[in-house]
Amino acid sequence: MNNPYNDIINLPPYVTKHPHMSLYDRAAQFAPFAALTGFGALINETARLTDSKPELDEETARILNERLKIIEKNIKLKPEITATYFVPDKKKSGGSLKKYSGKIRRIDEFARELVFTDKSVLSIDEILFIDGDLFKNIAREQAV
């Protein structure tokens, strides 16, 4: 039988120096177009919850000030404390409560900051509660 394609039917397959594209990459060319780029991230950001900053009542503020004075008196001992503080959110109103534990190096009264031995800094205005062994010992002494 005389076929017009006899000259190319038995040729070896086409060889290229470039590797073939994977089926996954080839299918990605036909993926749907995302017209609203970033819209999903915006929805997630809006749905993210933040807490409002708790207001200190007079009694809690008094206790916090007493504890800061106790720290200041014992600053040479570099007391270890755990501070609960409020971190304002950078993108929306509100924020979150965090805890930090460490040894106090100094109290910067001008900047109103607690400076720790690892060079971490907490704003006194954002601190809601301070706890530590230093205060437990003092509470026992006052009870006796």
Image (tube, grey):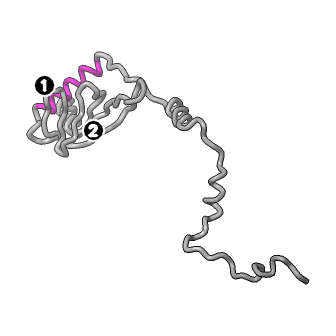
Residue under the image location 34 percent in, 29 percent down: 86
Does 60 appear above or below 31? above
Residue type, numbered disc 2 = Thr
Which residue is under mark 1? 110
The residue sitting at the left extreme is 76
Residue 18 in magenta? no
Residue type, numbered disc 1 = Phe
How far across and how far down the image is residue 3, in percent? Answer: 86, 79
- What is the chief secondary structure element of the magenta stretch? helix
User: In what element is the residue under mark 2?
Assistant: strand
Residue under the image location 39 percent in, 31 percent down: 96
Residue 64 in magenta? yes
Q: How many marks?
A: 2
Mark whose residue sits in front, 2 or 1: 1
Which of the pair 120/14 is nearer the observer?
14
Q: CA distance from mark 2 to mark 1?
A: 22 Å
Does 125 appear above or below 78? above
Q: Badge 2 local density, few (<14 within 10 Å), some, or many (20+)?
A: some
Magenta residues, as a range? 59-72
Compared across the picture, whether 11 is left or right of 3 comes to: left
Compared across the picture, whether 50 is left or right of 100 comes to: right
**Tag 1 or tag 2, which sits nearer the N-term?**
2
Q: Quadrant of the N terminus?
A: bottom right
**Residue 98: numbered disc:** none
Which of the pair 52/70 is nearer the observer?
52
Which residue is under mark 2? 82
How far across and how far down the image is residue 103, in percent? Answer: 19, 43
Does 27 appear above or below 39? below
User: In what element is the residue under mark 1?
Assistant: loop
Compared across the picture, whether 81 is left or right of 95 comes to: left
